[in-house]
Structure formats: C-alpha cells, structure tokens
Image (cartoon, rainbow, N blue to C red):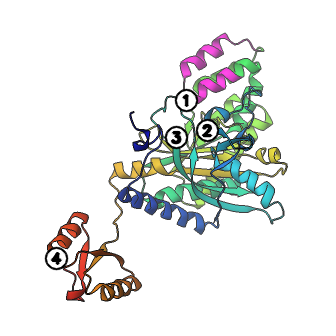
Amino acid sequence: MDDKKLHTPDGVRDILPCEMAYKRAVENRIESVFAGFGYRPVASPAFEYADVFTQKGTFDPEVPAAESQMIKFLDNHGHLLALRVDMTLAIARLVSTRCADMPMPLRFSYVTDVFRQRENFQGKQKQVTQAGIELIGESSNFAAAEIIAAAARSVMAAGLDNFRVDISSVKFFRAALSESGLNAKNAGMLQASILNKDYVSVEKILADASAPAGNSRIKQLFSEMPLLSGKTDTLEYARNFVKSDEALSALDRLEDICDILACYGLEERVDCDLSLIGNLDYYNDIILKGYVQDTASYIINGGQYDNLYACFGQPRPAVGAAVDVDLLVSALKNKGVTYGERESIVVAYSHSNAREALRTADELRASGEIVETCFFGDDLEALKRYAGGRKILYYTAEKKGTIL
C-alpha cells in the first residue's frame, strides 16, 4: 500500500449512495416495527472507557470475554478507551447512570455501528451495523416472547421470509452440567466444543471424562444435543435426561414462551434448539438466534441477562436482541428484494434565469420532490447527458411546467 490516504483500513469500507439508500430503507422498516412495540431510540458514544466492555467469562473467571474483540486506544490523559464493541453493555451503563429513577420497565431501541477486532477477519467487517431492542426491568416469559416477536417481525418487515429463530436456555445447559458431575475443566471444554459445533470433540470429552457413576443419561444428552432441535416435542424428549428442578423448570419456561409466541403467529418460525448456548457470559437464561435458512449466518442474536446490571451497580432483570443489519441487507439482496429509490429532478439554470430556477426548485421541494440545481448555462445537451447518466429527470426554467 503506497499511499494510505487513498485506502480504508482493513475491516472497514465505504458505502456509496445507492447502497446507502437500500440500507437506510431496511433500517427504517426495522425501526418502525420497534416503535410499534413501544421501544424508543437511544444512542451511546462511539467510544467509552474500556472497563464498560470488560465482563468476566463463565468458566474461566480470569479471562474477559469481550476484551479480545475490543479496539482500544489511549486518550491524551492516558485513559484506556475502546470503540463500542457491544450496545447491550453500553445501554446497561447508560441506564444505570442516567435512568436509575425512571419507572420500569424501560423499552429502548437503537440502530448503530459496533466495532470488533476480527481474528484473521473471518470474512467479516470490523465495523458492523446493529439494530436492537432492550427491555430493562422485566425478564418474564412474556418479556422474552415480546423481544423474540419484535426481532422476528422486524426482519419480516424488511422483506425476508426465509428465516427462522432458534431459542434455548442457558439455565438448562448449566443445570445439565451440574447434574453431569463433570469437573470445571471438562465442563469448560465441553461448552467450547458445543459452541464450535465440534461434536467429535464432545464425544471425546465425554468418553475421557471421569464423573460419578449414574450420569450416563446426561452424557447421552450432550451426545444427542445436535439433534435436539424442533418444536415442543423436543422439550418433552429432553425431560428423559434430566432430574433437577432447575433443568425441568427451564424446559417448562421454553415451552411457555413457545405458547406465547403462537399468539404472535410465529409458531412456525420458532424452534427450540437445546444445542444453542451462549458465548457471552451475561446471558443467564433464555437465548435466541435467528438465521437465514440453509445458511450459517445469524442475523438475530439475543437473550436474557439478569446478572449484567449488577456489574454497573444497579441490579435489575433485562432481555434484548440485535439484528445484524449488514447481514440482513446481504440476505435481502441475495433473495432479490428491491427497494425503489425516489426519483430526483435536476433544475438547470443559466446566469439569466438563476433566480427563477431557484424559486422553481423550492416550489418542487415544497410539493415533496427531490430537487438538485445545476448550472448548465444554455447547454441543454450537457444537461441531458448529466441527467441521463444519473438516470434522473430534468427541468428547465425556460420550459417551466414541463419535465423533459
């Protein structure tokens, strides 16, 4: 790279007007759905103190889960800052410091960019746009179902129909781990292998792990987890493998949420996938992912994080979800979904008629048109070439009232 001023850094890109118009149209449809559910927009700074985004891992308390993804830098005073890596954490800080006295629950929405360091890029950008919702102060079955429904409806409103949402329970997975008798090391390895869909390693860990006698049913549960996906009959089957009240209660909750989602008409779009477990430590119960069918691309990610707000000094329940706008736009384009751009008009003028042309342009804008003004003098052919190249209409003061 000879001249850096002519290039963008790795992992970020420019967006030209046509693509930006498409993206904004998608965002507007998503925001309209969120607003319809009562979620009000908020914004946070593009960068914060790095401590905001540092949360401890589940099985290894010494490893901050988000730190490896943070893009960090020092300010002029030596403070360690980070670009916004996660909006849920930013909103948790915002709510705990600015909204502590507001009546709960709070319903907040956002459409913003997050910035994440990618290992070898993994085919992903470092700057991505997310559209999300946060329901703070409640995490009941109805709250979780509302979040799932609003996220799913937003994707549908954008024009995507070939997607589904998987839901699961972190609490069920942790209860099953507790029943298994696996030590912390093997439990952590098992979780990592399931997260990576590495079921060969799962089988090896289960075969090699030493645990109390009588846990064969739990080992079978983990072995079958890749197959434990479907409707509520999947939950009934899973009951055969667990005995603890916590595990059974988690299955009851998933079944009730599925029943509530039927009220939204989403029963055919939602599956229970017990192999779905959270890789962000703040999820403590319900977790959800929505993805385009026949692909591994998740366009919705979210869950319940009742323990997160205690990290900011204001313990309270919460549940949320985010839509990956960039992946959604790509999926819509692959499906052939189009959004018609509004036509523009060019009003051409010369020195002699400039004032009349500007008044004409404003009259057209007042009637709702998108209007550019351009100096072309008396060169009508140059005006036609410009308008033709832009595929927009044109108008001249000399032929007022006529769009050529």
Could you say whether the residue bearing mark 1 is in a helix, strand or loop? Answer: helix
**Foreground: 75 or 390?**
75
Residue under pointer 3: 126
Neighbour class for label 4 at 10 Å: few (<14), some, many (≥20)?
Answer: few
Which dot, 4 or 1, sits closer to the camera? 4
The amino acid sitting under disc 2 is: Ile
Q: Quadrant of the C terminus?
A: bottom left
The amino acid sitting under disc 1 is: Pro
Q: Which mark is residue 117?
A: none
Mark closer to the chain start, 4 or 1: 1
Which dot, 2 or 3, sits closer to the camera? 2
Q: Which mark is residue 226?
A: 1
| Boundaries of the magenta span | 188-211
Give coordinates of residue 172: x percent, y percent: 71, 36
Marks counted in the figure total 4
**Is mark 4 in CB contact (under 8 Å) with mark 1?**
no
The amino acid sitting under disc 3 is: Lys
Could you say whether the residue bearing mark 3 is in a helix, strand or loop? Answer: loop
The amino acid sitting under disc 4 is: Leu
At x 80%, y 56%, the residue is 97
At x 27%, y 75%, the residue is 375
Q: Which mark is residue 380?
A: 4
Q: Quadrant of the N terminus?
A: top left
Q: CA distance from mark 4 to mark 1?
A: 67 Å
Mark closer to the chain start, 2 or 3: 2
